[in-house]
Image (spheres, rainbow, N blue to C red):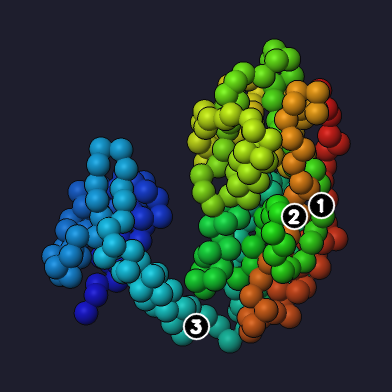
Amino acid sequence: MLDLLLLRSFVSVVEERSFTAAANRLHLTQPAISGHLRRLESQLGKALLERTTRSVQLTPDGERLLGYARAILALNRDAMEEVSRSAEQRSIRFGVSEDFANERLLTLLKRFMQCHPAVDIEVRVGIPGELLGAMRQGYVDMVLGAQCGEPVTGTRLWQEPLVWAWSEHAEQELPSPLPLALFPEPCPYREIALAQLAMAGIAQRTAILCMSGAGLRVAAATGFAVAPMPASQLKPGLIALSAEHGLPELPAAEIMLVSEASHSEWGLLRALADALLAGMRPVRAVETA
């Protein structure tokens, strides 16, 4: 029988891409996490991870185990919650793109819970592609995030331009190849930006890989790299590059609420969607260079 503790450590290492980060997430020591992985590999008789000094990669056997491990942990969590919760208390697991995890959103969520005392909202912040994957695996009930290009079924909150963000103090002539600040895959901004540059024949390089919107904004504001982002994310010190700089136009970003239609709590999710639709709007006009 697979030990839940060992599976939880395995999944955490994969998701965090680091033994140290996984240890912090689970409030354990790094040697303890390493010991859990060794025990799990010994139990299965298979190598699950390929470790280097800089990265952790899944082996083919690790790839096969990962889906089962997540499902086992999700079922265990759901069983515990279902048995322990009161008959009236309900929970919404809400995935939010890092771009929109701001004070206004959290205030709206708090207000919603005040209006619905029997509802708890658990927020998970991440990249839209990862959050949609988590929703399909049953970890998340609803996702708020941007989509570009291929449509996603859901409720559109608003639409806004996707822009090339750059420092207002940087030189007017852009470097070549174009240095980019990007989120890791999967990310709709990354995919559409790279596709548009490729179609325009513009050379590019990934100058910095960011794990947060704050990182993207710093990279752009210092002139270190150009960052594709929704126009509402432009902060003081940032401008949206115009066509004069020779960059291709980016499509609009659709800010969407997405949920599994078959979810048993769809009525409650619909109420939350209506509250967000009424309260969420872009907050800043676009400036172009």
The type of residue carrying mark 2 is Ile
Relative to residue 221, is residue 13 depicted above or below? below
Q: Which residue is disc 2 drawn over?
A: 255
The vertical placement of 110 against 72, above or below, is above
Picture disc at residue 127: none
Q: Secondary structure at mark 1?
A: strand
Residue sitting nearer the eye, 151 or 145:
151
Q: Residue at x 80, y 59 (%)?
A: 157
Mark 1 surroundings: few (<14), some (14-19) or many (≥20) residues within 10 A: some
Q: Residue at x 69, y 25 (%)?
A: 166
Mark 3: which secondary structure? helix
Amino acid found under the numbered disc labelled 3? Glu
The residues tagged by marks 3 and 2 sit, at their Cα atoms, a distance apart of 32 Å
Discs 1, 3 touching: Cβ within 8 Å: no
The reply to whether residue 23 is in sight is: no
Q: Is residue 94 visible to the viewer in this orientation of the structure?
A: yes
Residue 82's disc number: 3
Q: Measuring 66% from the left and 40% from the top, which residue is drawn there?
A: 199
Q: Nearer the viewer, mark 1 or mark 3?
A: 1
Q: State left or right for residue 112 relative to residue 69.
A: right
Instruction: Say left or right for 269 vs 216.
Output: right
Name the one closer to the observer, 164 or 145: 164
Residue assigned mark 1: 159
Q: CA distance from mark 2 to mark 1?
A: 6 Å
**Where residue 253 appears, x then y in whole percent?**
75, 49
In x, y percent, where is residue 23?
32, 50
Quarter containing the N terminus:
bottom left
**Which circle's residue, 3 or 2, is located before the other in the chain?**
3
